[in-house]
Image (spheres, rainbow, N blue to C red):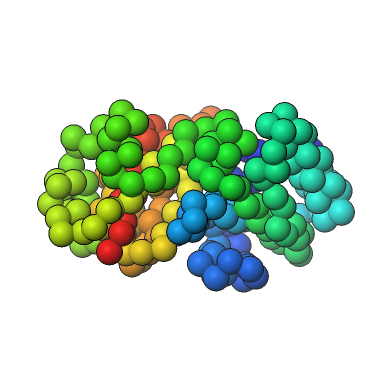
């Protein structure tokens, strides 16, 4: 079986997910950050019997991987919420105590916090962003009048689902709804499939 943390990153067939209401209808790998900072991830991928593993084996593998990670951090920062293998779809839901735990577990860039905290951390907001209508907008204009706007910054091909309305996003992100945005990697692999990481960091700003 391929390494769990990366082998289920491309969304496939539609699946109704139970649990976190914000992720109940997603059909692609998605991440939601709650008001308390916890991160919920729904990993969705296609499945066939040729993949060579059962739901029981997958669940055991994921639990072992999580246990190993938590032992290394000496904290229970990652938790398995659900793991299902259907006829043609795999679904895994994970919960992380915060954005730093998600980033550490997946070994990737992932930031969640206020716009000011992101700037203090050194993230660059000088480029133009796109608003809900797809028009270019400066970050200052997009957040004008919004109290404590928040931002999620990441480098994986993901759907981001937010608690409040998305104000704007970087140009490598497509805003797909009031509280959802999708970032896809370019066709940079030998077989033409999406790559593991985006060509540049993706930004989703929200808070209305």
- The residue at 36%/64% (across/down) is 164
- Residue 76 point in image, percent of width and height: 70, 43
Could you tell whether 82 is left or right of 115 in the image?
right
Whether residue 43 is visible here, answered yes or no, is no
- So how many labels did they put on this image? 0
- Residue 2 point in image, percent of width and height: 74, 36
- Residue 182 point in image, percent of width and height: 41, 53
- The residue at 56%/41% (across/down) is 102
Whether residue 48 is visible here, answered yes or no, is yes
- The residue at 76%/64% (across/down) is 87
Q: Quadrant of the N terminus?
A: top right
Which residue is more in the foreground, 30 or 47? 30
User: Vertically, is 81 above or below 200?
Assistant: below
- The residue at 65%/70% (across/down) is 18
- Residue 170 point in image, percent of width and height: 28, 44
Q: Quadrant of the C terminus?
A: bottom left
Which residue is more in the foreground, 125 or 10? 125
User: Vertically, is 92 above or below 120?
Assistant: below
Could you tell whether 49 is left or right of 44 in the image?
right
Could you tell whether 51 is left or right of 110 in the image?
right
């Amino acid at each position: 079986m391929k390494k769990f943390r990366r082998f289920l990153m491309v969304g496939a067939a539609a699946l109704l997910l139970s649990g976190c209401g914000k992720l109940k209808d997603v059909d692609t790998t998605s991440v939601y950050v709650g008001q308390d900072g916890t991160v919920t991830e729904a990993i969705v991928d296609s499945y066939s019997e040729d993949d060579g593993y059962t739901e029981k084996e997958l669940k055991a593998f994921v639990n072992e991987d999580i246990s190993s990670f938590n032992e290394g951090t000496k904290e229970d920062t990652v938790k398995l919420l659900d793991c299902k293998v259907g006829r043609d779809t795999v679904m895994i839901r994970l919960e992380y105590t915060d954005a730093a735990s998600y980033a550490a577990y997946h070994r990737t860039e992932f930031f969640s916090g206020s716009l000011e905290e992101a700037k203090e951390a050194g993230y660059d907001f000088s480029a133009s962003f796109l608003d809900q209508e797809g028009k270019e907008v400066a970050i200052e204009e997009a957040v004008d009048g919004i109290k404590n706007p928040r931002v999620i910054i990441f480098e994986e091909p993901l759907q981001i689902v937010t608690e409040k309305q998305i104000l704007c996003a970087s140009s490598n992100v497509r805003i797909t709804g009031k509280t959802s945005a999708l970032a896809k990697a370019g066709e940079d692999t030998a077989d033409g499939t999406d790559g593991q990481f985006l060509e540049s960091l993706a930004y989703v700003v929200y808070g209305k």
